[in-house]
Image (cartoon, rainbow, N blue to C red):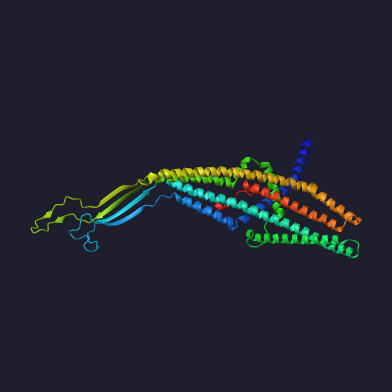
Amino acid sequence: MFLQKQYFNNKLYNNILISCFLFFPQIVFAIETTNSMESKIQMLLNSHPELLVKYLESREKHHRSEHADVYPDPKFGFAYRSYPYRGDVTRDRSRPDTPGMTGNEYSIAQEIPFPGKLDLEKQIVQKDSELDLLNAEWIKNQFIRNYFETVLLKSALIREIQDLESLEKSINTGSKLESSQYSAGKSNITGTLRALNLKEKIKDRLFTRNTQLSELNAKTSYFSLDNTSFLISEEEILKFLKEKEEEFVKSYSEELIQKSPYFKYAEVSTEKAEAEAKKEELLHYPETEVFISYMQRRRKPFLLDSGPLNVSIMDNPEFSGDLWSAGITLRIPVWSLGKSADLNRANLLKVHRMQLEKRKQTYLLETELKTSIQSWMGNKQRVENFQSSLLPTLNRSITTSAAAYTKGDISLVDTYQFLNESIEMKATFHEVNLNRWLSLLKVLEITNNIIPEDNSHEK
């Protein structure tokens, strides 16, 4: 019994080891692939000025917010007080007739903001920083979506151009054959003319698609600043989007709308408007400033009788030493208080407007999200229908038409008409498949789920 149990344990241990060796590398590879994809996206985002400008603006305001609640600096003063004017501005205090209040005054004053004012100013700048950060997230999602859209559209155009070039070669060969048969009297001129018309139609379509491809190649210079090829291939993007598609199907809920930068932007804007309204209410509260001063007077301990008798030293009961002063200054809103009702009403209207803006943005996002989801699901079903029904049916029709042409039942031009319809159908398939991924990208953009949020810009 013991040997059987030991054998069973060893067998189980070996099976676990084999499973680990078989599946662990695949798991690691999948994780590395995902991380590699996200790292490529982050590398692109962290080097492009369109995003760096907004992130730096947010960081700038964040640092300003740390300075916004600094207490006002004290004011230091110095003054020459009560010097007699004798035709000049000399500061000679030795003459006997110099007034006793003559001297040098040193003062210090400190402004005391109304309680809560500095905190509100800091809060407002912080909200500005948050708005810039959310705006950067918004631009980031749009940037990635435009980047992916450009890559996918470029790849779809390249495939369509290849199909058109292949069809053009076949039509050229067929046109020569049709012309030979017409010269030999085996066919009428109608087939030759139809082949030439189809050839010109394909040539014009090739010209249009090549022009569009050139435009996209020029557009890539905006995303790739060093004018190199794309860092991310179409295969990587499609694999990335398929993984996101599976994750979205599993985790979808109506609460995802609250992760949107658009929703958060409206929310923070409302909070900022409320803070600004509270700050402007404080404009009608008294502002205080306290001060203290020290006056160094002219030394005058006694007076001499300089009259004709010159009898003796005269008594001086007045204090002749240094003086100090202290006090408080209040700014009373005498004139502005009469207009405070208008300002308060304006602030209330602003807060109410931002609350309505938040509701409007919520409704717009919900509608746009539902529309994008329906578009994504519809295009996905169309792609499945193309793959399972339309394209196989069209391929069978082409094969049948080729066999019928071999038997002489139809003309060569009719066969190329089937090929042209096949190209049209493939182009439609590529367009529907592209719209599927673009709709999914729009959904991921709205819910802020394209890539995880990166806080490295805050460092």
Q: Is residue 115 visible?
A: no
Quadrant holding the N terminus: top right
Please report the residue visible at 70 percent of the width from the left and 53 percent of the height from the top: 236
Name the spot of residue 111 as percent of width and height, x first. Answer: 37, 49
Name the spot of residue 242 as percent of width and height, x first. Answer: 71, 48
Please report the residue visible at 73 percent of the width from the left and 62 percent of the height from the top: 207
- Total marks shown come to 0
Pick the front one: 344 or 61: 344
Q: In screen coordinates, is 46 left or right of 244?
A: left
Pick the front one: 175 or 335: 175
Name the spot of residue 262 as percent of width and height, x first. Answer: 58, 47
Q: Is residue 401 visible?
A: yes
Name the spot of residue 266 as percent of width and height, x first. Answer: 55, 45
Image: 54 above or below 177: above
Pick the front one: 189 or 196: 189
Residue at the far left in the pictured view? 309
Please report the residue visible at 54 percent of the width from the left and 49 percent of the height from the top: 131
